[in-house]
Image: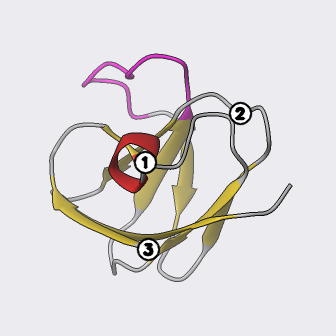
Amino acid sequence: MDINTISTDWVSVNALSGIAVGSPMEMQNKNSNLLTFQEKATKPATEDYSGRLVRYCEVYEAWAGSSEIWVRGATSSIFVNVQAVPS
């Protein structure tokens, strides 16, 4: 499933995809801009820019038991493909 949204803040991949927190999944950046991913139980602060930088077509993997997955774009555009991975 593709997530295509506009936001300058962190958004929950789990909430937008409907994939339960803690489920294994793969997320591919389909945006020409960098995306930053964070695994955290609560939403990161707006001024928090830490996390894993993922370039166009790169994949970020979340393993079974991970915290909630958050993403933000280098610009306001977030375009990512999300796939649940069988455990």
Specify the segment rendered in magenta. 39-49
Q: Residue furthest right?
A: 87
Calculate the distance from the C-alpha at mark 1 to the C-alpha at mark 2: 12 Å
Marker disc for residue 66: 2
Q: Is residue 39 above or below residue 40?
A: below
Where does label 3 land, which residue?
1
Assign a secondary structure to mark 1: helix
Assign a secondary structure to mark 3: loop
Q: Residue 44 lies in magenta, yes or no?
A: yes
Left or right of 47? Residue 14 is right
The mark nearer the N terminus, 1 or 2, is 1
Type of the residue with mark 2? Ser
- Residue 8: horizontal and vertical position, in percent? 16, 44
Calculate the distance from the C-alpha at mark 2 to the C-alpha at mark 3: 20 Å
* Other residues around mark 1 within 10 Å, as few (<14) / some (14–19) / many (≥20): many
Q: Residue 70 lies in magenta, yes or no?
A: no
Q: Residue at x 43, y 48 (%)?
A: 13
Contact, CB < 8 Å: mark 3 with mark 1?
A: no
- Between residue 7 and residue 55, name the one nearer to us: 7
Q: Is residue 40 above or below residue 9?
A: above
Where does label 1 land, which residue?
13
- Residue 38: horizontal and vertical position, in percent? 53, 37
Type of the residue with mark 1? Val
Instruction: Report the magenta stretch's main SS.
Output: loop
The mark nearer the N terminus, 2 or 3, is 3
**The N terminus sits in image quarter:** bottom left
Type of the residue with mark 3? Met
Q: Quadrant of residue 44?
A: top left
- Residue 51: horizontal and vertical position, in percent? 54, 39
Left or right of 67? Residue 80 is left
- Between residue 33 and residue 7, name the one nearer to us: 7
